[in-house]
Image (tube, helix red, strand yellow):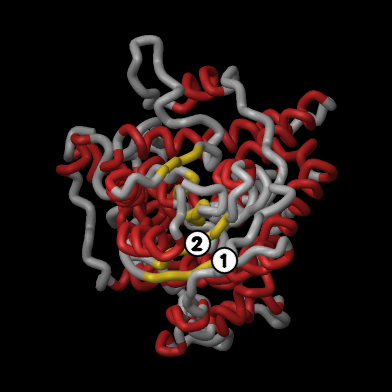
């Protein structure tokens, strides 16, 4: 092995230069560094919005590397084939990457590591995309936590390493391997006309993410505990978009939150708890990966969910035409911005799974199609929490009333009026943008009358409770 043998850094959902342990370690070797992004089956399997947003992120990260005199090599195909071919072509001494924790990535990465070791090539994976490795937070009995509150009590005492600086240099190889053109991948094809609507709401790249964090800590975190539940108020960090692609690390957010707490800013601890809630989702996914695909609680397998997406109620829910304004406003926010306020996600999810008695997997799949901040662990845990089938779940009898929730958390109707156009003399530009974002085949416009509820609030609650009681829940 010669000092000129390069290190390949396999970039995945970690589109940043700072606090990137794999890039940092590769740079520290003094060898040439070849960053690579691979479009494999996991990328191809993403929904329309997250795949489009990933493409934007990859393009931006490639420009960040270019500014440091480096490049991002793009290749497509099975990761094990692409990486072994690159090793042979470049004479690379090692391949480094940041760990992922979903079952598909774990299976892929295990095969890659074995193949590289068979070639006599160093294969190293690094921590840093979570605050804590999922196996490092355990109960006193040595098992994993299934309830958030004791998980938080244990996790809050764990040391979170200080974020690493961006590498000062990324030495280039004598010759770069050939790559593919990002535009040839057409990662945004499925977004169609919706891409132009969502794009103005995107905060792209590491610098934007750091700006978001700085602005949040400076002006919002003090009131975060109260204002995070008010969707009509700009009171959250909005960092989920950047965290989902690793444009900022959770450790960077954690340490900023800790500093704010030490400065006496009242909402900072609540912010840290929300970061730990994200961590809890990964903890559960790692230890019980079936949370992604089936009811976490075995007894819920017998529950009579509707799984027919052709149902008129499901169509109305997807089209944000349920006749329940708080629910429809949340879905329309998602179509226009690519995100949805967290409080409203609970209302939207409860209405689908409880008032409409539809399987949470319908909602999970639809969010995976539509959210630019889609995250496999958080999405699955969130849906199972609100449905009642997951760990630490909302009790079966908690059927959120979307009318009283709107009265409590959107009393001046700022959020609903921002997103619902029908029946208003002068609807907001954002409310009208919904009709530009949705598929034309839906045949909808602001001139349509606003619909009556597909299932009335009281009727839906009674139906849900009856179904739970009949199944012995």
Q: Position of residue 414 (x, y in %)?
A: 71, 61
Q: Residues within 10 Å of mark 1 (few under 14, many from 20)?
A: many
Q: Quadrant of residue 260?
A: top right
Q: Position of residue 232 (x, y in %)?
A: 69, 56
* Picture residue at 27% right of the left edge, 38% below the top: 296
* Picture residue at 66% right of the left edge, 78% below the top: 424
Q: Secondary structure at mark 1?
A: loop
Look at the image and tell me in which quarter the C terminus lies. Answer: top left
Per the image, the residue denoted by label 2 is 36
Q: Secondary structure at mark 2?
A: strand
Q: Residues within 10 Å of mark 2 (few under 14, many from 20)?
A: many
Q: Is residue 367 above or below residue 109?
A: below
Q: Is residue 49 above or below residue 467?
A: below
Pick the front one: 471 or 84: 84
Q: Position of residue 182 (x, y in %)?
A: 51, 77
* Picture residue at 54% right of the left edge, 80% below the top: 194
Q: Residue furthest front?
A: 2
* Picture residue at 49% right of the left edge, 45% below the top: 98
Kindly check if marks 2 and 1 are in contact, taking CB atoms under 8 A apart as contact.
yes
Per the image, the residue denoted by label 1 is 72
Task: Give me the C-alpha separation between circle 2 and circle 1.
Answer: 5 Å
Pick the front one: 149 or 409: 149
Q: Position of residue 467 (x, y in %)?
A: 23, 45
Residue 27 in sight:
yes
Q: Quadrant of residue 89?
A: bottom left
Which of marks 1 and 2 precedes in the sequence?
2
Pick the front one: 88 or 304: 88
Left or right: where 298 falls relative to 185: left
């Amino acid at each position: 092995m010669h000092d000129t043998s390069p290190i390949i850094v396999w970039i995945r959902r970690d589109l940043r230069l700072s606090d990137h342990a794999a890039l940092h370690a590769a740079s520290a070797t003094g060898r040439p560094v070849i960053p690579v992004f691979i479009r494999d089956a996991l990328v191809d399997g993403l929904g329309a919005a997250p795949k489009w947003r990933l493409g934007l992120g990859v393009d931006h990260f490639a420009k960040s590397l270019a500014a440091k005199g480096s490049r991002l090599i793009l290749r497509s195909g099975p990761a094990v084939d692409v990486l072994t071919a690159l090793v042979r072509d470049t004479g690379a001494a090692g391949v480094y990457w940041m760990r992922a924790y979903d079952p598909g990535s774990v299976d892929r990465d295990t095969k890659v590591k074995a193949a590289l070791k068979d070639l006599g090539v160093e294969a190293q994976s690094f921590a840093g995309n979570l605050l804590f490795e999922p196996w490092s937070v355990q109960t006193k009995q040595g098992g994993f936590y299934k309830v958030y509150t004791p998980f938080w009590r244990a996790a809050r005492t764990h040391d979170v390493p200080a974020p690493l600086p961006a590498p000062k240099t990324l030495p280039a190889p004598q010759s770069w391997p050939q790559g593919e053109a990002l535009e040839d991948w057409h990662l945004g094809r499925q977004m169609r006309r919706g891409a132009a609507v969502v794009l103005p709401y995107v905060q792209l790249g590491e610098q934007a993410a750091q700006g978001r964090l700085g602005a949040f800590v400076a002006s919002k975190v003090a009131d975060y505990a109260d204002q995070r539940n008010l969707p009509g108020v700009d009171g959250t960090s909005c960092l989920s978009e950047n965290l989902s692609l690793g444009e900022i690390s959770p450790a960077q957010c954690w340490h900023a939150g800790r500093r704010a707490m030490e400065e006496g800013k009242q909402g900072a601890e609540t912010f840290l708890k929300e970061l730990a809630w994200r961590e809890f989702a990964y903890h559960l996914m790692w230890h019980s990966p079936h949370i992604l695909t089936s009811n976490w609680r075995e007894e819920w397998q017998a529950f009579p969910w509707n799984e027919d997406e052709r149902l008129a109620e499901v169509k109305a829910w997807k089209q944000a035409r349920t006749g329940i304004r708080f629910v429809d406003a949340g879905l329309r926010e998602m179509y226009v911005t690519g995100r949805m306020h967290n409080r409203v996600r609970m209302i939207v999810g409860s209405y689908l799974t409880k008032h409409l008695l539809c399987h949470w997997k319908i909602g999970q799949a639809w969010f995976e199609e539509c959210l630019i901040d889609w995250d496999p662990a958080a999405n699955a845990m969130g849906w199972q929490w609100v449905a009642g089938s997951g760990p630490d779940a909302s009790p079966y009898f908690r059927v959120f009333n979307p009318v009283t929730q709107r009265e409590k958390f959107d009393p001046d109707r700022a959020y609903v009026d921002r997103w619902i156009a029908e029946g208003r003399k002068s609807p907001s530009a954002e409310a009208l943008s919904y009709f530009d974002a949705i598929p034309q085949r839906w045949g909808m416009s602001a001139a349509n009358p606003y619909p009556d509820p597909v299932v009335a609030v009281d009727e839906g609650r009674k139906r849900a409770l009856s179904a739970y009681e009949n199944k012995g829940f």
